Image (cartoon, rainbow, N blue to C red):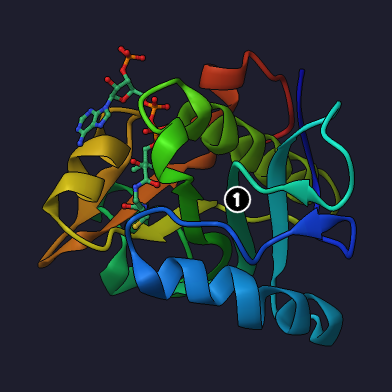
Amino acid sequence: MHRIEPLSAAHDRETFSCGSPPLDLYLRQTAGQHARKGISRTFVLVNETAPTPRPVLGYFTLNLCQAHGEDLPRELARRLPRDVPALKLGRLAVARDRQGQGLGRLLLVAAMEKVVEVHASAGGIGLFVDAKDETARAWYQRFGFTPLPEQPLQLFLPLATIMEALGSTGSTG
Ligand SMILES: CC(C)(COP(=O)(O)OP(=O)(O)OC[C@H]1O[C@@H](n2cnc3c(N)ncnc32)[C@H](O)[C@@H]1OP(=O)(O)O)[C@@H](O)C(=O)NCCC(=O)NCCS
């Protein structure tokens, strides 16, 4: 049975390999430090029956960010102040030997649920992501993310789309 939980000492991050060395290295060396310093939070997908330290099957990292009008799809920017708060999916990766089994989708849905939680207490207009390449971009687009004008590897998923996808209700004003 899979579980998504905050990264901690109970997780084996050393053996994680997703095919992208910078993403592996971030999990090993930086994710814990950034969480302790309040820079970002990393959540890992594990098999809850695995003995500790539990191998990481996948992870995602979220941080707060500020969006600027020129970064947003034009029709959304028209209705908002120039600088607005949002969340950023800093990283998302699945272990190479577990890719193509729906785990990336599971992680993305968990990240979207966190965006809704943050929105309930502090706001946030949606979720940004920097796709590392065209393949990743195509993957995110599959879930409704749209590339930003003139920055095709940066994508945005508005809060309303997230809520609709999750079947959530909430005050979006
Ligand atoms: C990109 C990544 C996170 C996807 O995770 P995954 O667990 O393999 O993806 P899933 O199995 O959840 O795929 C969900 C759906 O996307 C589809 N899909 C997979 N790769 C795709 C691609 N490149 N383009 C479009 N759709 C794709 C799958 O077929 C699946 O569709 P289905 O549910 O209709 O069968 C994973 O391959 C990975 O970690 N890659 C290396 C790191 C990386 O590129 N991270 C992206 C951050 S920039």
- Residue occupying the point 46% across, 56% down: 17
Q: Is 87 rendered above or below residue 173?
A: below
Q: Could you say which is closer to the camera, residue 35 or residue 101?
A: 101
Asked whether residue 71 appears in the rendered view, the answer is yes
Q: Position of residue 131 (x, y in %)?
A: 28, 58
> What residue sits right under mark 1 in the picture?
59
State which quadrant residue 84 falls in: bottom right
Position of 140 relative to 70 (above/below): above
Q: Residue furthest top?
A: 167
Nearer-the-camera pick, 57 or 93: 57
Say whether residue 114 is left or right of residue 148: right
Can residue 173 be seen from the camera position used here?
A: no
**Picture quadrant of residue 166:** top right
Residue pictured at 52% horizontal, 28% vertical:
103
In the rendered image, residue 83, in percent from the top left (x then y), is placed at 49, 76
Q: Is residue 48 left or right of residue 64?
A: right
